[in-house]
Amino acid sequence: MKILLAYFSATGNTKKIAGYVFEKLKKSGADVEMLDITPLSVREKKTDLSLYDAFLFGMPVHSWRAPRIVRNWLKTLDGCGRKCSMFFTYGGFGIHPAHYTTCKILEERGFLVVSSAEFTEKGVSNITPSAKLASPASWLIIPSSPSQPNTLAVTPAELAC
Ligand SMILES: Cc1cc2nc3c(=O)[nH]c(=O)nc-3n(C[C@H](O)[C@H](O)[C@H](O)COP(=O)(O)O)c2cc1C
């Protein structure tokens, strides 16, 4: 299975998380490629999604949603029923509607959204790889398709219960 990890990062936080996730996936034996969609030139070039079986989309939260740039890029993709997950980095105020609204876009584009995660500023602002990110307090995950507007995230510790 080949996975594409595509991310947008205006100020570098999401890039750090994406790099961490990428390394983790590679170490677990996954065949994964990373695509930085931050440069306009990359977004303008059509990405050949037929090369991949599953997708990970990483982005910051801008005004409680995925950045407009990312929303517009996602709307150009064709999921063809393939699975995807997403993750957000954000400053940390509240549970955002970003999971739901981005899930809706991805579903409209034919993706099967299986999970969504969020990394708060606590985790993204001072990255020292695994130690900080391994802390349940620094990130949250939504274990199934976040297709309800009021979907709540749970911590990895809760998932393990
Ligand atoms: C224009 C803009 C809007 C933002 N809106 C939010 C927001 O609604 N909620 C939040 O918690 N953080 C918000 N943030 C903070 C970013 O989500 C956070 O710093 C993120 O990690 C930045 O990711 P990046 O470094 O990959 O660009 C915003 C930042 C910017 C620049």
Image (cartoon, rainbow, N blue to C red):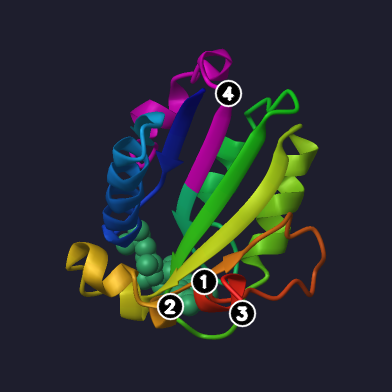
C-alpha gap between disc 4 and disc 1 = 25 Å
The residue under label 2 is: 136
- Other residues around mark 3 within 10 Å, as few (<14) / some (14–19) / many (≥20): few
C-alpha gap between disc 1 and disc 2 = 6 Å
Give residue 53's mark. Answer: 4
N-terminal-most mark, 4 or 2: 4
Query: Magenta stretch?
Result: 37-57
The residue under label 1 is: 156
C-alpha gap between disc 4 and disc 3 = 30 Å
Q: Secondary structure at mark 2?
A: helix
Image point (25%, 64%), residue name: 130
Image point (79%, 58%), residue name: 147
Check if mark 3's residue and mark 2's residue have beta carbons within 8 Å.
Answer: no
Which amino acid lies under the numbered mark 2 shown in the image of this protein?
Pro
Check if mark 1's residue and mark 2's residue have beta carbons within 8 Å.
Answer: yes
| Residue 160 location (% of width, % of height) | 56, 71
N-terminal-most mark, 1 or 2: 2
Give residue 95's mark. Answer: 3
